[in-house]
Image (cartoon, rainbow, N blue to C red):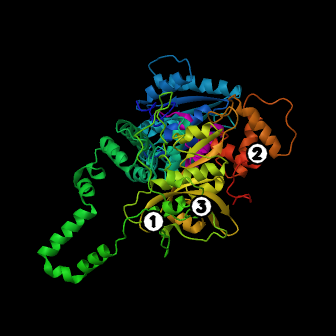
Amino acid sequence: MYKKYFGLSELPFTIAPDPRYLYLSAEHREALASLLYGINCNGGFVLLTGEIGTGKTTVCRCLLEQIPDSAEIAFILNPKYSISELLEAICDELKIRYDRSENRIKGYIDALNGHLLESHARGVNTVLIIDEAQNLSLDALEQIRLLTNLETSSEKLLQIILIGQPELLEQLSRQQLRQLNQRITARYHLHALNPSELREYVSHRLAVSGCEAPLFTPGALRTLHRLTHGVPRMVNIICDRALLGAYVERRRQVDSGVLRRAAAEVLGRGSETSGGVKGWLRRWMTWPTAAVLLLALGWWLPGAAGDGWWPRLQAMLASAPTPTNTLIPAAEAKPPVAEAVQSKEAPSAEPSAAAVPAPAPQQPAETVTPEGVVEPIDPEPLPVDIAAQPQVSAAPRVSSPGDWQWPEGTDLGATAVLAYRALFRSWGLSYDPQAAPQLCSFARAHNLSCLSQPGGVNELLQYNLPAVLDLFNARGQGFQAALIGIDRSKELAHVEIAGEQRWVALSELRTWMSGARLLLWRMPPGYNAPLRPEERGPLVPWLENNLARLQGKPMPAATRQRYDEPLQLQVLAFQHQNSLQADGVVGPQTIIQLSALTESGIPLLSSTARE
């Protein structure tokens, strides 16, 4: 229902174990490596466990796509069988003919043993994978152990992979299963995603489904981790319902409120949402209401008023700043917008570099493209009084985002508009949101693509590209700035905030940055989706040529048309050398790193070697 609204090619948060959507965290990569080891090792058991919804079955499905030709697989999905039914299911999976007799168990084992000997003679490894193995009875587990006794004089004929929930570990620790437990040659336990991995997980699934924009705010992602504890299946269910809620409410992003309401529908937890007592308090306990309650309390409890809280409240009210749209850096007063506009109109006056423009007028709920697709990123139109170029001081001073403050009540939406303009300016483009309100469509028209939610400061240093950041100050005010440069020798970041360029210590940026909103990257010719092993496409020649250029080799006379194994090995080596996820998939991260090393005209944050 919401697919067309957000410009998605498919639904990103289904719970089906589609290997294309597999997000390989460090733990998932190790788990997959353990399963691959189980296929190639010489007998024994491999054990993969994890809580419900942590991605065990999805990892297993990914394994099935990487099975070598020298292996055959028997995959048992529902092991709630008796011993004879389990053996029959294994024979059916391996397409083994068997004779039904009164002694059925012996007949199945004899037929299985003959098949294993024949497969071994042909050089084929046979692997038995049992999912949901915690449902196996103790007798069934013991029978499975006995299957590993089928062997030649030098090696086992059957490798067995058990996949299950933590209850399986409790079963294997029992005294009667100690022989099976001792035969486990590799074991791995999957944990839930941490907050950083969850952000990358959501971004990965959106990217695979064709989305280039950040559909979830940083606050929503923090709420999502708190509600799901990082369990991927619950993340999928709640995110799917949240996108549906955003579609119904005609929102362009999922914020914390939409996410909590979606979680309430899924989990039925009123206390976590806008319902219930906590939700009522959040809606009604505003500062005016709190002040009235405090006054009432002071009226009924006059003795408490002189004990400290009433004088502090009076001092807070007396010190409240006059509302203006003025940026107030530490110990600095800035002229209000009216004065800045007046000086801009005077012929002999220079525009004020520190004045922040009045907030942009409200946009419609969405903007529909000619194709009928609503773009999820739709910056506010640029007001006339902020059209001037940023003022660059000769010697930018080092300051802290925590000190960049505005009077309470200021609409800081204009800082996002200025940040996006600075981002495009770093690519040599003049961006006018009034003429091109669809930010990512404007980027695609210039062979650029949006990459959303790239992570924190360390991830941005890895990308080495300008980006729009979400920052906050000591008052808790949230605003946007453009990261346009890095001085690695001095550990400084060059940012543009509200039309003014400043330098910030990287340590300060880490403290006051709540997330990275967006960066731009150059798409290779014909790119429309990540390139996976054995696929064909226009990205293959580009990849081969750029790898040859990077290695100082001559350009190939005839370029490949298929992403074959030799090219995959080069990509894996490149990913490993550049601290990327070494999965052989050529997506935005790999393309960004390769382009930065081989192509010109890309605005890098720093030209020095990456940390």
In the rendered structure, which disc, 2 or 1, sits on the residue that comes first in sequence? 1
Q: Are marks 3 and 2 in contact (CB under 8 Å)?
A: no
Q: Are marks 3 and 1 in contact (CB under 8 Å)?
A: no
Q: Nearer the viewer, mark 3 or mark 1?
A: 1
Of helix, strand and loop, which one carries label 1?
loop
Residue 386 included in the magenta stretch of the image: no
Q: Quadrant of the C terminus?
A: bottom right
In primary-sequence order, the first of circles 3 and 2 is 3
* Figure check: 55 above or below 313: above
* First in residue order: circle 3 vs circle 1: 1
Residue topped by disc 1: 336
Is 313 situated above or below 273?
A: below
User: Mark on residue 15?
Assistant: none
User: Start and end of the magenta stretch?
Assistant: 16-42
* Left or right position of 277 against 184: left
Please give the residue where the numbered disc 3 appears in the rendered image.
495
Name the amino acid type tagged 2: Glu
> Which residue extends farthest front?
347
Residue denoted by label 2: 599
Which of 447/221 is in front?
A: 447
Q: Report the mark closest to the observer, 2 or 1.
A: 1
Name the residue located 76 percent from the left edge and 33 percent from the top edge. 541
Percent position of residue 354, x then y = 53, 65
Could you say whether the residue bearing mark 3 is in a helix, strand or loop? strand
C-alpha span from label 3 to label 2: 24 Å
- In this view of the protein, which residue sits in the foreground, 251 or 506? 251
Disc 2 to disc 1, how far (Cα)? Answer: 44 Å
> Is residue 183 visible from the viewing direction of this image?
no
